[in-house]
Amino acid sequence: MENLKHDATGSGENDQDASGDKRYSLGYTERVVARNADPSDVTEFKGDATQDMDWVLKNYDKKNSEPQSLEEELKRLQALKSYLILDSEREHQFERLTALASRILQVPIALISLVDLGRQWFMSNRGLGDVRETPRSQAFCSHAILSKEDILIIRDAKDDQRFANNPLVTGPPFIRFYAGAPLETPEGYKLGTFCIIDTKPWPNGLDLNSKQNLLELSALAVEVLVARRRKRERELEKNSQLVACTAHDLLTPLSGVELSLHLLKEDEDFQRKLSQHHRDVMENVETCSEIIQEICSTVRATYAEAKSSFEQSLMTAHLQRVNINKLVDRLYTVLEPVDKVVPLKVVVDDSVPKEMMVDSSKIFRCALNYLAVACKRTRKGMIALRLAVQKDSDDGKKSLLVVTCEDTAPAIKLEMYEYIFEPPKRGVALFEGEFENDDNKSQEFHPELCLFSVACEMNVIGGEYGFRPRNATDEGCRDYDKEVGTVSGSLFWFCIPCSELKESAMTKSMDLDDALYSSMQPTVTREDAVKFQQSISGKLFYQRKKRALVIEDSNVIRKMLTKILSKLGFDVSQAENGMDGLAKLKSSLFDLVLCDFLMPVMDGLDCVQQYRDWEKYHRPWIKQRIVGISAHATAGDIERGKSVGLDDYRNKPVTVKVLSELINCEGQVEMSNRLDEIERREENLRSTAHSESMVSEGFPKASLVNGRPCACLLVAPISEHIKSMQDLIKSSGWQSTVVGTEGEVLTLLKMRMWDLVLVDETFAPCIGAFRDWERKKRKTLQKSVTLITETFDINATQHTLPPNGIDALTAKPMSLHSLGKLLHRTYFALKEEASNCTAS
């Protein structure tokens, strides 16, 4: 069964394989000529971008197969992912189907196989034990999904030149007969096969009844897949609609409350009769009403922007400038009417600046949920909420906002720990018996839901959260600890990445009162972008401190390497085993990674291999440089290390001289230069965020033309900078819609006329397709389409005209200052155009 887990090794150049087939290799061109085969039936593969991809078959049947292009394969994989079935647990519906196939067709092995990128995964496996996947390069099903036939039948694999040397034929499970019917979805994609396998050949293949049975079983498996996906989509849509509609319905009565409060505040006679206490109560009601309205508006807007993917649309953080003192005041205001038996204090540490760039809504809601649980549970003692900033690096550019909530409530039972932060479960009560003496209103309070809400919010923005019993080092409730002589209670916490805001000459130099243009220019943002770049040039090119990661189980060697690298100017992170090292590799990029070969828990080569697999999907734009180190590695070990992803190797002991040579080698210098470039670009984007508030100050609160708000379509892959652009568009009084797929782009462009369309260069072909449709279907053409492109040089004295279908060009990344100016100019141009139409 070992062959089911590893790829087969390739044969040498111009040699003869075990089956007698002659293999010829010349550069990137390879031909495989089988015995007794017509040369016209053999496919030639020439070197191209897809040559080394796992899904590219190099020996398929040319006459009876339809090879797929890269675009077609990507669409097929997207369809496969949409069913959310990969890597799931075994499900009885599919298990019954393979059991039925094994009995009816009298075969030892029956599989429902899905062909993923680089692997085939078994949705159901009857006859292969616990094996759930094999490499795609060895999969018979990879051929079946390309076959023009309804069923791919291999009567004897040893007599077929495509499979004669396949490890699954020459080794366990010793496949001789194979028959696979594609799992074709209603959209026309072949996700995999329903296949049967035998260890002995079937010279006569399948009779007509057996073929029909196999096709029926395949169709049944697809029906189960489709029904499974539809059920999940209905549940998600139902839940998302319920949340969005509830938020929408709440806004109407909330508007009535706010209007009534406003009228009472404007009534001078009424105000004169009120005491200071009653005025304070009114202020509290007004603040609470605003908070509820903000939450409801956020939920409704999120649903409106992405109805087709409501779950994904929630997975985003809305960064904004937050005044910490104001946030604390709001917490006090909302909690003032809450029933509290013990004192409550909120402490802001000296490390917390006055203003920060964070998602204020999520911080507020998480802190409020913690405090609500603490207020409900704590009957003796006190409650303390503390906000502090923890530096993640020496330069202070990366920080964490840490929020802790201490209480002196009864200890949580040990057996309940696993249910904390989990969805409420029937029959499980985290705090059973604590609220029995409360009034009936306590029945409406669900502490489990409060804690689960914190977990959801933190997962959305990449934060961390947790719980532990209080101990003697915790200071929040120390006064009570001294009074009673014991330490009791719980500590709940969460932390999120944050950015501190400071005044700078850069932000002060920006002025939105420059002369306004009345029409769009071919290079609409050139002057603004040049001005912006000059204003921040002094900030961008700071000296970045290099980072290193040492993955080594020996504490002595780890400390020694850390000390040497620190002296060489590196900020060093450490990992004592491969699993810890893998987590750190995923969390950050490093100039240099040193990884030992042999370690407990997970060895170095497994760590590197798993990281490379993860890197393909999550960081395809950069390859982390990793250097292996060992005192006992053989030449074979070193070669295997490089085959799984090591870039270089050094013998132990690793001296200062060796490290100095290593960090100055060409590959290492190139890696550091790439990280410098990435850091400069990220600093550029972070710096643009400082201008957001000032950019929006010059705009009207609502950019209305003929009574309707201006609308902008932003076509770009989702990123933090795109989210900042969207926030600025909204704060400027415009309606904003962001799309990131080709289908959505064309749909929204055809749906209406937009006041401004901003298009990332990756979606430029979509504009051409839209213009072709537009010329046939519309009399009035879409105006103000601006392409955001890296090829546009903001410092150039002359610029080429925009390509066909594009009205203007701007530099990528587009600064928020430039975006603000463009919105301003476009708004006034639209107003002038509307005025001219009215006058005529």
Image (cartoon, grey):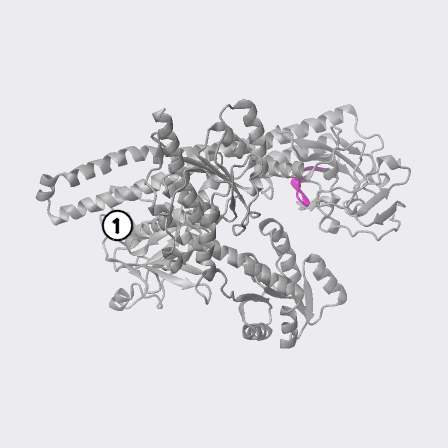
Relative placement, left or right, of 436 versus 786 is left
The residue type indicated by label 1 comes to: Leu
Query: Residue drawn at (63%, 72%), measured in percent from left and top?
Result: 659
Front residue (pair 543, 274): 543
Quarter location, residue 546: bottom right
Q: 284 left or right of 457?
A: left
Q: Is residue 244 above or below residue 316?
A: above
The rendered magenta stretch, by its main secondary structure, is classed as strand
Image-quadrant location for residue 686 = bottom left
Looking at the picture, tell me which residue is in the foreground, 341 or 770. 770
User: 94 or 474: nearer the eye?
Assistant: 474
Please provide percent x and percent y for residue 353.
Answer: 34, 61
Local crowd at mark 1 within 10 Å, few (<14), some, or many (≥20)? Answer: some
In the picture of the structure, the residue carrying the numbered disc 1 is 335
Residue 119 among magenta residues? yes
Would residue 131 be seen by someone viewing this image from the given angle?
Answer: yes
Image spot of residue 340 (x, y percent): 23, 52
Image vertical order of residue 454 relative to residue 202, above or below: below
**Residue 399 pos. (x, y %):** 43, 60
Q: Is residue 269 found inside the magenta-colored segment of the image? A: no
Q: Write the residue at 44% across / 45% down.
A: 819
**Element type at marker 1?**
helix
Q: Is residue 427 visible?
A: no
Which image quarter: residue 262? top left
Q: Residue at x 82, y 45 (%)?
A: 30
| Residue 454 position in % (x across, y down) | 39, 49
Write the start and end of the magenta stretch as one range: 108-125
Question: Is residue 296 positioned above or below 227 on the image?
Answer: below
Q: Quadrant of the C terminus?
A: top left
Task: Judge from the rendering whether residue 618 lies leftward or rightward of residue 411; answer left or right.
Answer: right
